[in-house]
Amino acid sequence: MEDSILRMENINKEFPGVKALSDVEFSLQPGEIHALLGENGAGKSTLIKVLTGVEIKDSGHIIMDGREISPRTPIDAQNAGISTVYQEVNLCPDLSVAENVFIGREPKKAGRIDWKTVNEKTVALLKDFDLDINVEERLDNYSVAVQQMIAIARAVDTNAKVLILDEPTSSLATQEVQKLFDIMRMLKDRGMGIIFVTHFLDQVYEVSDRITVLRNGSYVGTYETENLPMIDLVGKMIGKDYDSLEAIPKLSGGGSDGEVLLSVVNGATDNISDVNVTIGKGDVTGFAGLLGSGRSEIARLIFGADKKHSGTVEMEGRKTEITSPLDAINNDIAFCPEDRKKEGIIGDLTIRENIVIALQSKRGVLHKISRREADEITEKLIEELAIKTPSADQKIKNLSGGNQQKVLLARWLATNPKLLILDEPTRGIDIGAKAEIQKTVVELAGRGMSCVFISSELEEMERCCTKMFVLRDKKIVGELSGDEISQSYIMKQIAGEETE
């Protein structure tokens, strides 16, 4: 667009084995709040890193105020007029507020820092943000919301023309979010261009002028917010148009006949509250929603990976205290986390060692698993799950993503769980391995095991789940079962549309 303050054209970025950005387009006008949206892996973070010099693009053009720029460091981007405020405030907590605002550009007198001027200028600057605080206090004496305002104030005072807000509301209370939006509108009125990265769709519609959607590293489109219904936005983000979806045959299996294995009543952690779910015996229970909707947070609450502050958990009708993953394992609950590389596999251990480690934890250090038993367990599960490996002595890091995922599944099956929680079990693996894992889940449910299945791909949710909870903005907004579980129905609930 002719009046754009910023244009990114045909941006490409590749990492080993991954095409992170493919001919991505983005434009920002002065006096505009522009939401950048997409599911996990869509390319949002990589695009921001390219723009801010954290990563260097492979090809394409970045044009700022009509002049092409190629930022190679964050300082290059800042000098070009681009500032970023991250979800985790990137300031110095042990310095004062004023020191943080002027760090690296302190006014000087007679060759020394003029602290009186630093403090006075900071007070004057923060008045614009309705912040009346002691600027000589350490930054970490103030709340996350105040620290965020200080970070934005610093960005504004560096003469930024483009302000990037990366998930700025994720740690804020409702009142604090509204205060941030007031600041964003004030900066917009001054002519600043704001890139707003968030997963809260309601907030997008409250404050943004335009929306750009990325999916799988590619540009989907840019839309006027007021002309894009939320249901259409959800469809563009996940790559489906709800009214043209074809029914996918479901695999048979599962079904609790009303028997409850586990229930959570009014559960809450630091990351989610008001959790009320029941998981039936032999059911595949899905948690559906966009990234950040609260899917993983419920799984972590059940498994004790996040500390429960309130609420009750019952297992087979008995009140059960689960304060740690070991408590969960001892109560026959298993969990394959979303990030298998960081939280799942232990790369330098063998397949055998990765498979038996959870069972050993369950039995305790006094009941060591013998090599013979470990071999028997491992060989049986390698065969059952069709794990492709020359031997159980192979290091797990040398396997493909799909086979790594199968080893994690084997790890938990070795503990003979009553409840198996799978968070994005098919992400980043090939189609054949996906189908095998889906089939395994349904077969396990058919044998009476309860499963929680979390996935961004609605096709496999519809295919596998016998029951489903739909989440939006960290709240459960719907509960579906049987024929109600359809992609179009799920998308409507995610978007907050009325369903018949």
Image: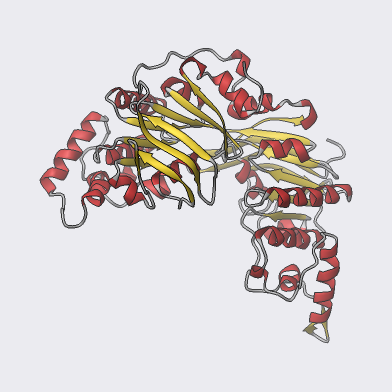
Give the residue displayed 83% in from the left and 45% down from the top. 5
| Quadrant where the N terminus is found in the figure | top right
Report whether 249 appears left or right of 206. left
Q: Nearer the viewer, residue 435 or 398?
A: 435
Report whether 316 appears left or right of 236. left
| Quadrant where the C terminus is found in the figure | top right
Q: Is residue 58 visible?
A: no
Report x, y in % for residue 88: 61, 56
Q: Nearer the viewer, residue 137 or 160?
A: 137
Q: Up-down: is 173 above or below 454?
A: below
Q: Quadrant of residue 94?
A: bottom right
Report x, y in % for residue 46: 60, 45
Report whether 210 appears left or right of 457. right
Q: Is residue 465 visible?
A: yes
Report x, y in % for residue 161: 82, 52
Report whether 331 appears left or right of 373. right
Give the residue displayed 46% in from the left and 50% down from the top. 308
Give the residue displayed 61% in from the left and 51% down from the top. 55
